[in-house]
Image: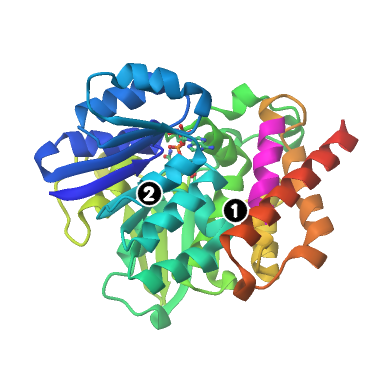
């Protein structure tokens, strides 16, 4: 039996992971499940999967979690430290599906144990790509991408040499505002930004899809994971969300990955890698679909894409600044404190203020320096937003 843990088990990726594991319970020995506010879901899954420990990020909810697990023999714990401790428990395969920078520390701990890390938490690579890739290398752990585009690129590179790669193209649906004008986007509400045309995901990543901050994070994630130059990375708008990524080779060939917009494909690929197993995803009928569409992204409506390349040019801790500023700006937008397009203005201003003096070098990167940068960028974003109000 493979020992598995799921961080962010109650979220969209976590629940899809549990769906796959519950189809073959005899194959898995579940060590740890973690969640946040949804104690009922966390306890229900921990009991169904016979986990050793269930952890909520919210310390105030520890009593509720204990009550829900009473009599099951499953340990209950709470807080960020308890989540990191759960990551230190030996496991063969660990799903990193916490949303935001909070996902970095448990992923690092799991890699230090030599675990295979299925990485949905893109913020880990954006904030600390150098650190997380270095930790995997040092401890013999492996990282398997779960973001659909990166899983697609990873699959396109099987048996290939990175030296033969000319470019990597990741696709974007265009999100909720694909066909909106700049003026309409300026007035967009959180409710409008929270519905995705093709994918069913957590609210934060759905809003990030509408602003293309999600794609910007993924451009950075691509560079950090595959080690290519940022000039080799392209974004292509593809409204159908069926082609997830393409790898362009030196001989002109483009290898496209085509599949239904169902995260259980990428999760299942990482779960069964290096094998491929039957997965409960729908099969595409291309004759019925008939045509696929592609267009270049409009950088005026999606400034986040331009900022991603700036971040990669600056290097060092710029990714941590970018992500932290984006998280604060997203909080403010969801709270109706700033407008939709102001999110990118806040992030750009944070980069302008901090990057000349606070970027450090990759060689100086540690969890502490990343978290310090993260805190500073959040504080700076808050100051900038106060002046905007
Ligand atoms: P979600 O909001 O549905 O779930 C997030 C999970 O993290 C929940 O279990 C929540 O309890 C937990 N969590 C939230 N804040 C936490 C904190 N401070 N400390 C500890 N745990 C915390 O998010 P999601 O859509 O499942 O996305 C998870 C990650 O996967 C994100 O990094 C996202 O970018 C990435 N991702 C998601 C999808 C998708 O289809 N949903 C696709 C690609 C990548
Ligand atoms: Mg993605």
Q: CA distance from mark 2 to mark 1?
A: 28 Å
User: Residue at the spot x=61%, y=46% of the render?
Assistant: 213
Specify whether tag 1 is near ligand 2 (CB below 8 Å). no
Image coordinates for residue 379, horizontal then vertical, percent: 77, 44
Image coordinates for residue 49, horizontal then vertical, percent: 21, 32
> Which residue is labeled 2 in the image?
87
Q: Is residue 44 above or below residue 26?
A: above
Q: Residue furthest left?
A: 26
Q: Colour scheme used in the picture?
A: rainbow
User: Residue at the spot x=56%, y=33% of the render?
Assistant: 176
Magenta segment main secondary structure? helix
Q: Which residues are magenta?
A: 321-332
Q: Nearer the viewer, residue 170 or 364?
A: 364
Please give the label number shown on residue 122: none
> Which residue is labeled 1 in the image?
216
User: Residue at the spot x=35%, y=23% of the render?
Assistant: 41
Q: Residue furthest right?
A: 387
Q: Is residue 67 above or below residue 367?
A: above
Q: Is residue 340 left or right of residue 177?
A: right
Q: Is residue 192 left or right of residue 50?
A: right
Give the image quarter of residue 144.
Answer: bottom left
Q: Secondary structure at mark 2?
A: helix
Q: Secondary structure at mark 1?
A: helix
């Amino acid at each position: 039996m493979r020992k598995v843990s799921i961080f962010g088990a109650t979220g969209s990726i976590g629940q899809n992971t549990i769906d796959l594991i519950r189809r073959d319970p005899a194959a898995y020995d579940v060590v740890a499940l973690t969640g946040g506010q949804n104690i009922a879901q966390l306890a229900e899954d921990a009991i169904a999967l016979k986990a050793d420990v269930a952890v909520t990020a919210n310390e105030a909810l520890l009593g509720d979690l204990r009550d829900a697990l009473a009599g099951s023999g499953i340990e209950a714990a709470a807080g960020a430290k308890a989540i990191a401790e759960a990551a230190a428990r030996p496991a063969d395969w660990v799903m990193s599906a916490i949303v935001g920078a909070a996902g970095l520390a448990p992923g690092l701990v799991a890699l230090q144990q030599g675990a295979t890390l299925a990485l949905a938490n893109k913020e880990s690579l954006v904030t600390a790509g150098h650190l997380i890739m270095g930790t995997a290398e040092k401890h013999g752990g492996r990282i398997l991408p779960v973001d659909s585009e990166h899983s697609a690129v990873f699959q396109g590179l099987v048996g290939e040499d990175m030296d033969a790669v000319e470019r990597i193209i990741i696709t974007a649906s265009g999100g909720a505002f694909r066909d909106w004008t700049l003026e309409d986007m300026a007035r967009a509400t959180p409710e409008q930004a929270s519905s995705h045309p093709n994918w069913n995901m957590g609210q934060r990543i759905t809003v990030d899809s509408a602003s293309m901050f999600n794609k910007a994070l993924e451009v950075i994630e691509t560079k950090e994971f595959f080690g290519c130059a940022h000039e080799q990375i392209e974004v292509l708008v593809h409204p159908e969300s069926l082609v997830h990524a393409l790898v362009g080779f030196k001989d002109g060939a483009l290898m496209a990955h085509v599949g239904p917009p169902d995260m259980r494909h990428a999760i299942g690929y990482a779960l069964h890698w290096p094998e491929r197993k039957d997965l409960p995803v729908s099969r595409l009928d291309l004759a019925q679909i008939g045509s696929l569409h592609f267009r270049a992204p409009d950088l005026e409506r999606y400034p986040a894409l331009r900022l991603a390349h700036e971040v990669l040019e600056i290097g060092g801790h710029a990714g941590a600044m970018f992500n932290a500023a984006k998280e604060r700006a997203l909080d403010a937008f969801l709270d109706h404190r700033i407008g939709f397009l102001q999110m990118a203005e806040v992030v750009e201003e944070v980069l302008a203020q901090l990057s000349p003096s606070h970027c450090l070098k990759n060689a100086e990167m540690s969890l502490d320096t990343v978290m310090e940068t993260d805190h500073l960028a959040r504080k700076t974003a808050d100051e900038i937003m106060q002046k905007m109000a």
